[in-house]
């Protein structure tokens, strides 16, 4: 392993690598923000999957995004190899002083190792305890307490060799002025001029979702209180069908659906303008927490201590407080069972009202 990094170390070029889902990428922003604060003069780049680019593309601290397209493999072995070599050449051409690998994949480790960066930070995962992983990284972070940490705390632990603490770590979600204007125009078209609540009841995994009937009851109750509800969801066919069913069960006319109509940065602009966000364990929930919009998050059998909303302006309602839940490690992610079904409507209504009446 390399010698300790001196306190006066002042990198000019930094690369952070994370190859995961949308919410995971948003939860790298505390590390990005901390790096910017510690090294205001540095160029900070991120390597990520192409589909997660919208989560970081408007972040003011990021100079550029290196992209891995998971569709490369569909182009055949030789073309995929050419893409990988071009990516590695682009990384090396940036002359990084520090590469921080937050991922556990071999792909990210190999890029880290061949980056030529003098400081290469990664995690000492037990499944990667071998000579090649150690060659790729010259500063390995212990994972002894890794599974007890929130994802933000895990990411921040990678900055310890640089003398950066996790204390005060703040997530952030950014969007352009054009995205904000687009949302304002859509709200005007829908004749929404006053306060509104955003509800995103969907997830790419059905087991994380509440029952449609209960979502409809929640909407009707809040609408009866005088609130305007904006429903959102991804363009995915399954999520669109869920929203259509929820709308068919609603009696209130004070609900507008923007499901599938917004990009992720536009959804962020919408959530930023809302008086309350209600959702399940999903990227939009993390966006609400990062934007400091009051956030009511419904959780089931996912690892709550890893994925709960990061910040202070939120509340979690956990299905495990109402009924036994299976271990997250035992879940068949393709199941149609909705483990949030034990959460009663009246408790969600009460929690929402407590936010709205503050």
Image: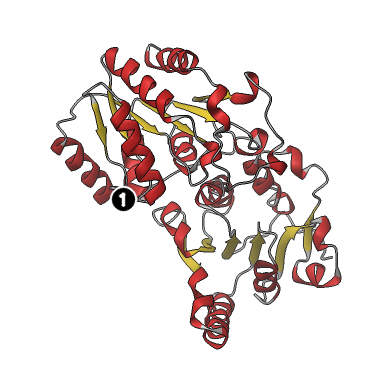
The residue positioned farthest toward the bottom in the image shown: 78
- Secondary structure beneath label 1: loop
Q: Is residue 302 visible?
A: yes
Q: Position of residue 1 (x, y in %)?
A: 84, 65
Left or right of 239 in this view: 298: right
Q: From the viewer's perspective, is residue 263 above or below residue 171?
A: below
Q: From the viewer's perspective, is residue 17 above or below residue 25?
A: below
Left or right of 6 in this view: 254: left
Q: Nearer the viewer, residue 93 or 173?
A: 173
Q: From the viewer's perspective, is residue 159 above or below residue 150?
A: below
Q: Position of residue 272 (x, y in %)?
A: 35, 35
Q: Position of residue 183 (x, y in %)?
A: 24, 42
Q: Residue at x 66, y 61 (%)?
A: 101
Q: Nearer the viewer, residue 274 or 101?
A: 274
* Quadrant housing residue 241: top left
Q: Residue at x 34, y 23 (%)?
A: 219
Q: From the viewer's perspective, is residue 230 above or below residue 54?
A: above
Q: Residue at x 62, y 42 (%)?
A: 152
Left or right of 315 in this view: 106: right
Quadrant, the C terminus: top left
* Quadrant housing residue 288: top left
Q: Position of residue 338 (x, y in %)?
A: 54, 34
Left or right of 196 in this view: 208: right
Q: Is residue 233 visible?
A: no
Type of colouring? secondary structure
Query: Residue under circle 1?
Result: 176
Q: Nearer the viewer, residue 50 or 123?
A: 50
Figure label count: 1
């Amino acid at each position: 392993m390399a010698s300790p990094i001196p306190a006066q170390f002042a990198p000019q070029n930094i690369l952070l690598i994370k190859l995961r889902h949308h919410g995971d990428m948003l939860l790298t922003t505390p590390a990005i923000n901390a790096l910017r604060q510690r090294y205001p003069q540095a160029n900070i780049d991120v390597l990520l999957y192409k589909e997660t680019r919208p989560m970081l593309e408007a972040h003011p601290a990021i100079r550029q995004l290196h992209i891995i397209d998971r569709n490369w493999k569909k182009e055949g072995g030789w073309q995929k190899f050419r893409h990988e070599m071009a990516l590695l050449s682009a990384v090396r051409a940036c002359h990084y002083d520090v590469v921080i690998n937050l991922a556990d994949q071999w792909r990210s480790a190999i890029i880290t190792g061949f980056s030529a960066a003098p400081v290469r930070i990664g995690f000492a995962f037990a499944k990667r305890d071998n000579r090649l992983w150690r060659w790729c990284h010259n500063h390995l972070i212990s994972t002894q307490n890794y599974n007890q940490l929130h994802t933000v705390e895990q990411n921040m632990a990678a900055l310890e060799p640089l003398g950066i603490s996790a204390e005060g770590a703040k997530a952030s979600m950014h969007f352009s002025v054009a995205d904000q204007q687009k949302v304002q125009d859509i709200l005007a078209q829908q004749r929404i001029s006053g306060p509104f609540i955003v509800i995103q009841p969907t997830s790419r995994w059905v087991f994380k979702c509440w029952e449609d009937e209960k979502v409809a009851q929640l909407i009707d109750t809040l609408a009866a209180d005088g609130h305007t509800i904006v429903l959102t969801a991804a363009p995915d066919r399954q999520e669109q069908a869920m929203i259509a069913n929820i709308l068919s069960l609603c009696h209130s006319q004070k609900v507008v659906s923007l499901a599938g109509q917004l990009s992720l940065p536009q959804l962020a602009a919408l959530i930023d303008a809302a008086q309350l966000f209600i959702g399940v364990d999903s990227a939009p929930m993390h966006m609400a927490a990062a934007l400091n919009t009051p956030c009511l998050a419904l959780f089931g059998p996912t690892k709550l201590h890893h994925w709960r909303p990061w910040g202070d302006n939120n509340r979690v309602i956990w299905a495990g407080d109402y009924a036994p839940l299976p271990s997250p490690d035992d879940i068949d992610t393709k199941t149609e069972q909705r483990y949030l079904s034990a959460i009663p409507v009246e408790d969600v209504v009460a929690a929402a009202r407590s936010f709205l009446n503050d």
